[in-house]
Amino acid sequence: MRVLVAGATGAMGKQLVPRLVDAGHEVFAMIRSESDKARASQLGAVPVIADALDRAQVEAAVRQAAPEVIVHQLTAIGHIDTRHFERSFAATDRLRIEGTDNLLAAARAAGVRRFVAQSNGAFTYTRTGGPVKNEQDPLDRSPVSQMASMIAAIEHLEKAVLGAAWTEGIVLRYGAFYGPGTSMAPGSEQFEMIRKRKFPVVGDGGGVWSFVHIADAAEATVAAVENGDRGVYNIVDDDPAPVAEWLPELAAMLGAKKPMRVPRFIGRLAAGQAGVVLMTELRGASNAKAKRELGWHPAHPTWRQGLQVSQPR
């Protein structure tokens, strides 16, 4: 199939594009500038240039590629400051709203039959009820103020993609990424904070995280491109775990001392309301649907194994 990947040179794109090529697909990479052409070509894709926020450019790029499938992996997430969570996600929120609308408009004009989009299943589910959510559970209906715009952008993307009756809209709610090119990789700022005991457990550390290795997420995306049906899929590993469990275990993997514990009010001062939510109230996600319907099984079924093998020896 002819597949256009928007966001082809990011952490996910670097994993996804070569896998699509190896699977026999003709892959086009939507990039912002001439300077990205070499990187796209090295991944095995044909570069097409467009700013995702410029509808005319996006429509021209999609016409040029004439894809059967579009994969929307556009993000602009750098360092996340939990005290100012909304600032950290502002550029990505715009891509998830305006970028999604532009890609969908171009896809409709070009007759694209399948549209696969990146969503977030790590930080967005309702914070009530059981610790692990499935795709039928709602997103957070009363988010703290710093997280409201991020969740609103996710909701916009999902409604737009799933509501496009003229194509097969597929939403992939990825867990928290780890592995090459992510914020949880050997030498990353986050790992260094853990090593230096600057990443404490806040409150009871009861927030449940669902992780996924970036390579496993890419494999799931290939499965969605080839086999997915309209709908939402959680793309996470088999082992959702509370912060009080995974953070000390990761510290031990890194050869660091056990993380400090601080009360919620101290955590709020240091990391803001969003930081406290991530540490104490988050809900995890189930991957049962993706396994059942996509035929996908993560090669790293648990972060305990995946993070261990990713450490330098």
Image: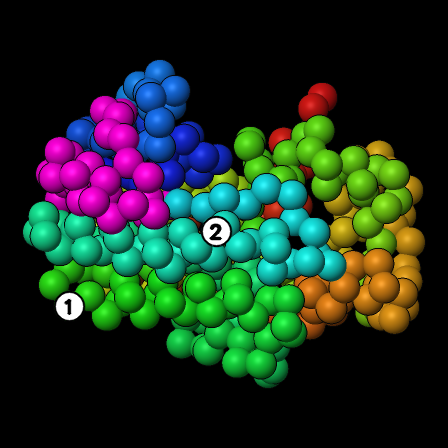
| Spot occupied by residue 24 in the image (x, y as percentages of width and height) | 19, 29
256 left or right, relative to 212? right
SS assignment at label 1: loop
Residue 193 image-quadrant placement: top right
In the rendered view of the protein, which quadrant contains the C terminus? top right
Of the 4 image quadrants, the one containing the N terminus is top left
The residue that appears at 50% across and 44% down in the rendered structure is 76
The one of 249 and 229 positioned closer to us in this rendering: 229
Taking the spot 38% from the left edge, 23% from the top edge, the residue there is: 36
- Mark 2, other Cα within 10 Å: few <14 / some 14–19 / many ≥20: many
Is residue 111 shown left or right of residue 26? Answer: left
Image coordinates for residue 159, horizontal then vertical, percent: 32, 70
Does the magenta-highlighted stretch encompass residue 49?
yes
Residue 200 visible in this rendered orientation of the protein: yes
Whole-percent x, y for residue 152 in the image: 47, 69
Q: How many marks?
A: 2
Please, what is the three-letter code of the amino acid marked with disc 2?
Thr
Residue at 33% across, 39% down: 51
Q: Position of residue 172 (x, y in %)?
A: 38, 56
Boundaries of the magenta span? 45-73
Residue at numbered disc 2: 92
Look at label 1 and name its amino acid: Ala
Residue 296's place in the image compared with 193, above or below, is below
Pointers 2 and 1 in contact (C-beta within 8 Å): no
Instruction: Measure the C-alpha gap from mark 2 to mark 1.
Output: 25 Å
Q: Earlier in the sequence, mark 2 or mark 1?
A: 2
**Compared to 178, does 132 lie above or below?**
below
Name the mark on residue 165.
1
- Neighbor class of circle 1 (other Cα within 10 Å; few <14, some 14-19, many 20+) is few
